[in-house]
Image (cartoon, coloured by chain):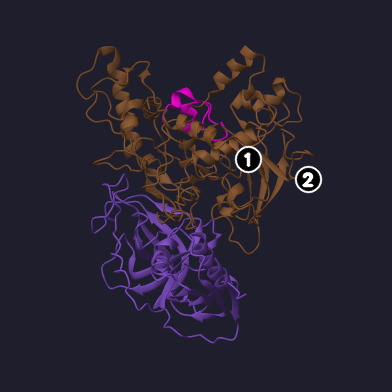
Chain colours: A brown, B purple
Amino acid sequence: MSISVATIQKRWKDTGGKDPIFAAIDGQNCPHLPSGDPASHSLLLKRGLFRIFLPWPPKAPDGSRIDPEFTLEVVRDPTGCNTHPEYGLNSANPTISVYRRPRPIINMKYPTQDRFGAGEFVGKTGMPASRDPDTNRPVSMNLMSDARHPTLKMQAIDAAMNHLQYAGKPTDEQIARIVAFEKQIYGAQVWRKGAGSLIEKDGPTSFGPRALAAGEEGVLGNNTSRWVFPMGDAWKTPQKKEEAEMRASIRRGHDIFTFRTFWIRDSMHLNTVGLGNPTKRTCATCHGMHMTGMDSANGWMDLGTTNLPWAKETPRNPWTKEQPEMPLFRVTCKAGVPPHPYLGRVFYTQDPGRALISGKCNDVGTIVMQQFRGLAARAPYFSNGSAASIRELIDFYDRRYNIQFSDEEKLDLENFLSSL
Amino acid sequence: MRARFAWLALSSTVLIGAKAPADFAFVGCPIVRDTKSVPCWLAEYRGELYYIGIQTDVSAEFSPPSLGHKVLVEGRISDEPRICGGVVIKPVKVSVMEERAEDCNLLLPAEDRYDLPFEPPRPPGPSAGRLAFTYAPPPPAPTPPFKPRSFDIHYDFNGTVGFSTPRFLQPVLKYAREVNASKIEITGLRGATQLDDGSLLIEHDYIAEKRAHQIADLLKGVGVTRPHYVINAHINYEIGDWKVRRVTVVVSP
């Protein structure tokens, strides 16, 4: 499904860094660094990040060059890759390297659904949606963090050619078998310390992988008929003493997720889609897809996880040895296009996200949401691994949107999210 | 071979004053006031508060503005009682001004005396399984003999394609497919708004051309590649209300 940084570290220890996930092409900070040296793999070992290398300027699906609406300048290059003469932005094949967490390969009927939110135009931008080249049908574009490939098939081919450095092109049969394998995997938490089994007969109706396999994809969650994460009447009756407290906390966490309003502000592709800025809503507003908590519409959005001033950055000082880990780029929106509505014409990012594909200034830092299932098993969180735990993830939102969660609310929400 | 694509800049057109200006237009700071249900939106101009609408969802005709930006308000002053403490502007069209305005940052807390005099069509939390508003049903499919048909796509001030564009583009797309269009003529226009303070707010000089090309790209992007496209743009601006900010698309069978 996915991989936690703890598993990566164990694999490093078990194989002496020889496992293929530590390959020079994407398991190192940059291929020119010496393999086997932990420093060369620091982003993977510390934050679970793989190198994603993309052409700059971007190319359209037909191979034509996209003229980006902004310029990129490397401000900080701790991996050495973006300024490297062979791999960098000024190389013969100008390439940008960003570093991202792998997304879970589970419950794939949900992120690949073609019902609610999947139409001819992207619901948030009005631009044409990507299409499945085999069927010519528009897709939801919720598969990858930058929506660069429309289908599991295209993603598998890209992964084989780029991540795997496969010599040649995989056959149709190979790709079909990979896709079939991916489509049959359902994953979710089934047991939780303090709560016991999450998949008992009378347990929450959305919990566990069987609920996902049986669930309906392409449905926008609501609070009457199809909740985002249906709980049913589970755990409302007296529970066993040793499980009662945690189960009650999980239920409260569900209600916080669904009903606790706060002011969502300055988030590109959320506050720009007719809701106003700020808008008074809940977690379930954006994380609204029934059963997964993904965005039901084409789901890239900027929460501030990679764009400054909200991205994780530690102010430097001469008394600590801590060094910045992530690259930093200065983005300048060109004349003739509107400035970014919340960040202005010049701003900074660790990862331009969707903008590396679209070339749009207001896409900089936008990342496609991923599903909330099996969260407890795959820390760290956010596309750049900047939240080491679910609590850090909640703390980020609390700071970002000034939610002012109480300690108990944070704990309840943490217990709920780690039970999905 | 016949050109599949043509571009024409109409620099000599004189359209100024073609439509009546809005009764009341101003640029001011938006203000959001919390209520016990959904937030209401106000705008301040010359010491007076004006009520412009409430938060609903993406289906609403009214899209609330943005703190951190000034807002252009165009509409008419209504004689109905104040809402949320503001003089009601109805009908109203608001446009978020492009540049940042850090001093427009007022979020007012809920007060019992400012209750909405109506039930909001959607609560601030999850919906009841539907959007707040429903759109009119689409017109019946056309029958032969097909005729050229004109469509207008409207914009916010200095606006280009956005989340609401497809709602207005879908009828164009539908008709083009139904009649197997052979020609699509797209004309971009830009507007200017006469403000209450006597000044004239004019859209970017490149905006008409950009709008026209974007609409052509959108139609081609969703597969309408057969027709011959003719793309025009008016360089001169037209003074009027929000309806002058538009692209006109004529679809010919």
Amino acid identity at mark 1: Gln
Judging by the rendered image, the residue that carries numbered circle 1 is: A350
Dominant SS of magenta comes to loop
Q: Is residue A58 left or right of residue A370?
A: right
Mark 1 or mark 2, whichever is nearer to me:
2
Span shown in magenta: A373-395
In the image, what residue occupies the spot 58% across and 27% down? A48
Provide the chain ID for the residue under circle 1: A
Label 2 crowd bin: few (<14), some (14–19), many (20+), radius 10 Å: few
Residue A323 coordinates in the image, percent (x, y): 69, 29
Q: Secondary structure at mark 1?
A: loop
Amino acid identity at mark 2: Ala
> Image quadrant of residue A259?
top left
Which image quarter holds the C terminus of chain A?
Answer: top left
Judging by the rendered image, the residue that carries numbered circle 2 is: A92
In the image, what residue occupies the spot 62% across and 56% down? A345
In the image, what residue occupies the spot 37% across and 42% down? A288
Residue A5 lies in the magenta stretch? no
Residue A375 lies in the magenta stretch? yes
Residue A347 coordinates in the image, percent (x, y): 63, 49
Mark 1 or mark 2, earlier in chain: 2
